[in-house]
Amino acid sequence: MLHVVHHPAYVSPATPGLQTPGSQFRFDKYGLVMDALRESGAAHVIHAPEPMPQAWIAAVHDPDYVDQVATLSVPPDKERRIGFPVTDRVARRSMLSPGGTWLAAKLAMIHGYAANAAGGSHHALYDTGAGYCVFNDLAIAANRLIAQGDAARILILDLDVHQGDGTASLLAGRGDIFTLSIHADKNFPVRKARSTLDIGLDDGTGDDAYLAVLADALPCVLDDFAPDLILYQAGVDPHEEDRLGRLALTDAGLDARDRTVMHQARARGIPVASTMGGGYGADRMAIARRHADCMIRMAEEAF
């Protein structure tokens, strides 16, 4: 059974003029993913998140920036860096998304696996958003889970095609959170942060080479760091047809990637909570199905 966290407010309207010129981000993706789940026929239960309390967001981000988002007063330069204006709807979903990642983690501890059908905002930095990310739900959720005693050691496994620079910078120096990013080396962001472990891949890396890197790195991290929870940034933008990707994974490659993660976690009794991360292209339903398929196969492999 797939346990998926979703809220209707995840879906902000694709209003003309809402995004900056050239933006590839579409707010309706989150609704289409739920449509794809229903169309798949996969058994699933939907859990509604609460907004993350502002104090927990401010425990990771600059309190002044958090207040700017909450009061809809984000400066234009920060909105340009984010990629869209912070409207009331955007602010609400930006509070809900970290709550969703936190709830998915709590559910994963019960069921072995759960998914937040949003989240993965790994580019958000201390005092600003960036790269279509307002608040870093991965860092916020990890910090809260540890602070409240739900976990002692957390691995944030980022397999989005872009490096998780915000997550790396926000959590730098923490011995209780390990950040592992496997990404396209020449892709955004140009200036990379330093994760606990970064593996930058050459453009055009395909299934076999990618899976070999994952199979080499992940078991070592799991055995050496011994996390009791994995937050999995399950971006589908390493796909060969992704508009913003530079890697060349096929559908089968993405399938094997996700099953490898779940197999390694299950073998060690580690729960996994996933976030959606990136996925870009003209065929929005195809992107949504890739995200839905990821959740479905992870749930199939869960213990």
Image (cartoon, rainbow, N blue to C red):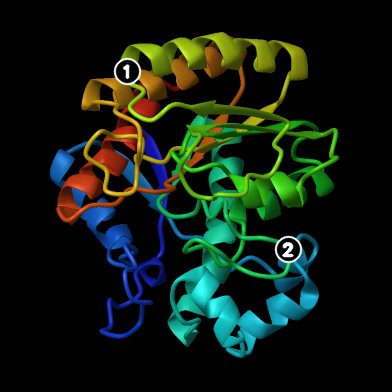
Q: In this image, 48 relative to 24: left or right?
A: right
For residue 53, the mark is none
The amino acid type of the residue labelled 2 equals: Tyr
Q: Is residue 44 or residue 27 the one in the foreground?
A: 27
Q: In this orientation, does residue 271 appear?
A: yes
Question: Mark 2, residues whose alpha carbon is within 10 Å: few (<14), some, or many (≥20)?
Answer: some
**Residue bearing mark 1:** 207
The amino acid type of the residue labelled 1 equals: Asp
Q: Is residue 21 or residue 216 the one in the foreground?
A: 21
Distance CA(mark 1)–CA(mark 2): 34 Å
* Residue 128 in the image: above or below residue 251: below
Helix, strand, or loop for circle 2?
loop
**Residue drawn at point x = 55 percent, y = 41 percent:** 163
Q: Do the residues labelled 1 and 2 touch (CB within 8 Å)?
A: no
Residue 268 falls in image quadrant: top right
Q: In this image, 233 relative to 290: left or right?
A: right
How far across and down, in percent of the image, does residue 41 sit? 16, 39
For residue 126, the mark is 2
